[in-house]
């Protein structure tokens, strides 16, 4: 089975342990960078690299040093 390349807002929010609304609010406020968009339906889509970057940003916001989790969503 092929590895998943893109993830939805819902999937990313679950991985980060925040709500979809919080993810979108952080994006709107500039805390998180804006993700790529699907060329046809314009939905947000996140790559593994973007998710890892969001984890690091979220940890800095929470005052933690580094993400130590072993779980992967792919």
Image (cartoon, rainbow, N blue to C red):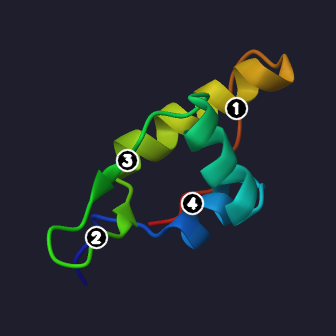
How much space separates mark 4 and mark 2, taking CA atoms?
Answer: 16 Å
How much space separates mark 2 and mark 3, taking CA atoms?
Answer: 19 Å
Mark 3 neighbour class, 10 Å CA radius: few under 14, some 14 to 19, many 20 or more: some
Q: Earlier in the sequence, mark 4 or mark 2?
A: 2
How much space separates mark 1 and mark 2, taking CA atoms?
Answer: 25 Å
Q: Of tags 3 and 1, which is closer to the observer?
A: 3
Relative side of 38 to 50, left or right: left
Along the line of sight, the residue nearer the viewer: 18 or 25: 25
Mark 3 vs 1: CB contact within 8 A: no
**Residue, x 56% and y 29% (percent of image)?**
30
Mark 1 neighbour class, 10 Å CA radius: few under 14, some 14 to 19, many 20 or more: some
Mark 2 neighbour class, 10 Å CA radius: few under 14, some 14 to 19, many 20 or more: few
Q: Position of residue 39 (x, y in %)?
A: 15, 68
Q: Which residue is mark 1?
A: 58
Q: Quadrant of the C terminus?
A: bottom left
Q: Which residue is mark 2?
A: 3
How much space separates mark 3 and mark 1, taking CA atoms?
Answer: 15 Å
Q: Earlier in the sequence, mark 2 or mark 3?
A: 2
| SS at circle 4 | helix
Q: Which residue is mark 4?
A: 12
Count of picture labels: 4
- Specify the quadrant of the image occupied by residue 41: bottom left
Mark 3 vs 4: CB contact within 8 A: no
Q: Position of residue 21 (x, y in %)?
A: 72, 60
Along the line of sight, the residue nearer the viewer: 23 or 71: 23
| SS at circle 3 | loop
Q: Earlier in the sequence, mark 1 or mark 2?
A: 2
Q: Which residue is mark 3?
A: 35
The answer to whether residue 66 is above or below residue 36 is: above
């Amino acid at each position: 089975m092929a590895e998943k390349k893109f993830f939805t807002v819902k999937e990313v929010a679950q991985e980060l342990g925040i709500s979809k609304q919080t993810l979108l609010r952080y994006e709107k406020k500039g805390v998180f960078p804006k993700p790529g968009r699907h060329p046809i339906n314009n939905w947000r889509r996140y790559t593994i690299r973007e998710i890892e970057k969001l984890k690091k940003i979220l940890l800095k916001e929470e005052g933690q040093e580094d993400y130590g989790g072993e779980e992967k969503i792919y």
